[in-house]
Amino acid sequence: AQSVTQLGSHVSVSEGALVLLRCNYSSSVPPYLFWYVQYPNQGLQLLLKYTTGATLVKGINGFEAEFKKSETSFHLTKPSAHMSDAAEYFCAVSENSGYSTLTFGKGTMLLVSP
Amino acid sequence: KAGVTQTPRYLIKTRGQQVTLSCSPISGHRSVSWYQQTPGQGLQFLFEYFSETQRNKGNFPGRFSGRQFSNSRSEMNVSTLELGDSALYLCASSLGQGPNNEQFFGPGTRLTVL
């Protein structure tokens, strides 16, 4: 069975600082990996995804993530945090099984202070 | 293009009642998935439908059921409501099945069971 672990339920950064949100996964087959963002009272929005090929994936709003198979990790980074980045972030995995089913981590709330 | 629509947005029910939630996918999308989001369990997969057929099901009791209509709209039903069913129910749609198809999430229906 696949699973996702996100280290840290809350991460606090100052505006302009580096953002690093950690995600580790377990999967019996090569996974598809995703990062979603959720703003208050809204649904989830896809930030970026890894399927195959280049292990460094660039997404929207300046975010990127690197797939490291040896570490089973898919950490999300952004060089400079903005106040508008404050939200909850979810890492998710999907096995290439023909289904769209996503297995999510517990989420990390990103807090950005001025 | 209109996004995924979920109705109602908010719902209050009492224990023992039943409830029906509705999801209208993005026009042209044929796959609809449902997720339950709670503070304790996070995001958990409920069902996945494609072309009116349930293709995958999460680990939820039989009180949770769903269906998809020929126009791809989907409903989920929860019977004999329990306090623990209080959650945000999210619907997601995609063009087709499989993780290569980006899932677009609706804003959710917040169900409160008293």
Image: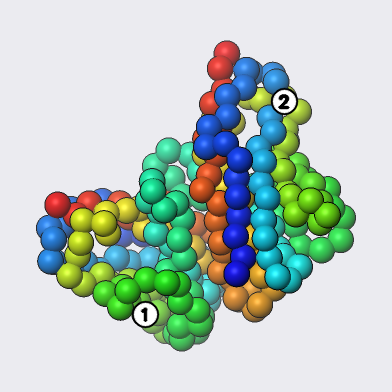
Q: Which residue position is annotated with label 1?
A: B67
Q: Which residue is drawn at 20% across and 61% down?
A: B82
Distance from the alpha carbon under mark 1 to that under mark 2: 44 Å
Residue B12 appears in the figure: yes
Which label sits in the foreground, 1 or 2? 2
Please state the horizontal and vertical placement of residue A81, each as a whole percent of the image: 66, 25
Amino acid under disc 2:
Leu
Amino acid under disc 1:
Arg
Badge 2 element = loop
Q: Residue B87 carries which label?
A: none
Badge 2: chain ID: A
Neighbour class for label 2 at 10 Å: few (<14), some, many (≥20)? few
Badge 1: chain ID: B
Badge 1 element = strand
| Quadrant position of residue B103 | bottom right
Q: Which residue position is annotated with label 2?
A: A18
Q: Residue at x 60, y 60 (%)?
A: A3
Neighbour class for label 1 at 10 Å: few (<14), some, many (≥20)? some
